[in-house]
Amino acid sequence: MELFEKLRILTDAAKYDASCCSSGSSRKNTPGGIGDAAACGICHTFTGDGRCVSLLKILLTNYCVYDCQYCVNRASNDVPRAAFTPREAAELTIGFYKRNYIEGLFLSSAVTKNPDYTMELLISALSILRKEYRFNGYIHVKSIPGASKELVTRLGLLADRMSVNIELPSEKSLAEFAPQKSKKSILSPMRQIKNTITVSKRELTVYKNAPVFAPAGQSTQMIVGATPETDRNILFLTEGLYKNYSLKRVFYSSYIPIGTNKKLPTSAPPLLREHRLYQADWLLRYYGFSADELLDDEHPNFSTIIDPKCEWALRHLELFPVEINQAPYEMILRVPGIGVRSAKKIIRARRVSKLGFGDLKRMRISMKRAKYFVTCGGKTFENIWLRQELITPLTLSDAGAEGFGQVSLFDDPTKGDVVKCLTGEI
């Protein structure tokens, strides 16, 4: 099979893996080397200054011995198969980098023969890149569940970021649809990666030239909508992963109906559900929320009408309105329409003078939402009465009617609103 045909098959097979995250890793070029890694971000997206940065995203092979029912590359699925040799994968990466097509590599693989054999192929490809071609660019690699600890360690010393996909949100679902995988085989390497990263950082404080293990940390991905778990189940799992395994990111991927198992859904879940989970994930990581604050037994899923932060505020109207000149930073951060940067601006500015609604507008805060939840000097915005203004959207959110988009209390979004929606800052 020609190399171009392999590339077509294996880039298409890799599109189901999420990897759109900033690098978090800095590696300067060395004499005679090629490329570097920048902490500011290597991802499939546009940066703040308008640059489009990207990764070569491929599978080493899509020949798989596993038969996970939700996966397009499962053994029983009739799809075109291909496999790169480690050298072909390395040469492709260098060729694309020299043409300025990419800034780094995302490398994953189906499980061919067994996990250890697959890991050895991945290690071989990265070894050629790092040692033979002296490539210093960013590399994100997927670790194979069930592989030996020694191979996980070797792979982590060659990569910037590692990830082990948890895939399904519960052990029961994993046993039903991916019986060749287990909770232990997934969480064990996660724990090892976390501990090895900690040891590596400690060694670097003592020995400047100590080997660096996965300096950009680790991430994972789970499929949403393939199994009956609620948003609450998923969010509690996410919170546990962040706390127990120090993950940098948890990615959510809406299920794509590609299986033949009758127990799997025949249609994909709405993309809005994936978006809501990303918004809630942002609240966990940057806004000080916990999973049990956002969802409970009475509300196991997020609203289709309003974002999670606004939904939480509507359920806790007794905490509002917030006096912008006196409230602590943690409470200001919970006001819909005020993000992390805006909250910090408010804290700095009010040390100098008393703030009014005009000052908040000049800080480019989204007053279309925030005005319902704040006071300035004890005064509300244009004499708005909180409960009267918000009772209608609260009723709509409980109805959960189909066809609604994310209105979030404003009908005509500004450019700033759009940017915050895309980045997850709410």
Image (cartoon, grey):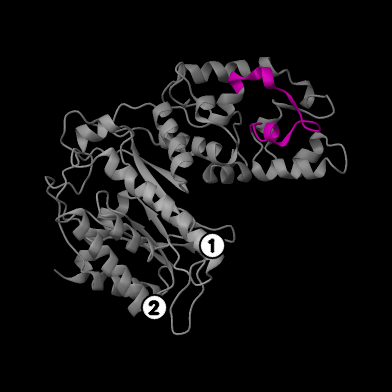
Give the quadrant of the N terminus: bottom left
Secondary structure, mark 2, is loop
Residue at the image position 58 percent from the left and 19 percent from the top: 315
When the figure is inspected, residue 352 is found, relative to residue 114, above or below; the finding is above
Q: Amino acid at mark 2?
A: Arg
Give the quadrant of the C terminus: top right
Residue at the image position 33 percent from the left and 79 percent from the top: 132
Residue 34 can be seen in this image: yes
Horizontal arrangement in the rendering, residue 99 relative to residue 92 (left or right): right
The residue range painted magenta reads 314-336
Residue at the image position 41 percent from the left and 24 percent from the top: 402
Q: Quadrant of residue 61?
A: bottom left
Q: Amino acid at mark 1?
A: Ala
Q: Is residue 320 magenta?
A: yes
When the figure is inspected, residue 220 is found, relative to residue 337, above or below; the finding is below
Query: Which one is earlier in the sequence, the residue at label 1 or at label 2?
Result: 1
Q: Position of residue 131 (x, y in %)?
A: 35, 77
What residue does disc 1 label?
39
Q: CA distance from mark 1 to mark 2?
A: 19 Å
What residue does disc 2 label?
134
Q: Residues within 10 Å of mark 2 (few under 14, many from 20)?
A: some
Residue 42 can be seen in this image: no
Q: Position of residue 296 (x, y in %)?
A: 47, 20
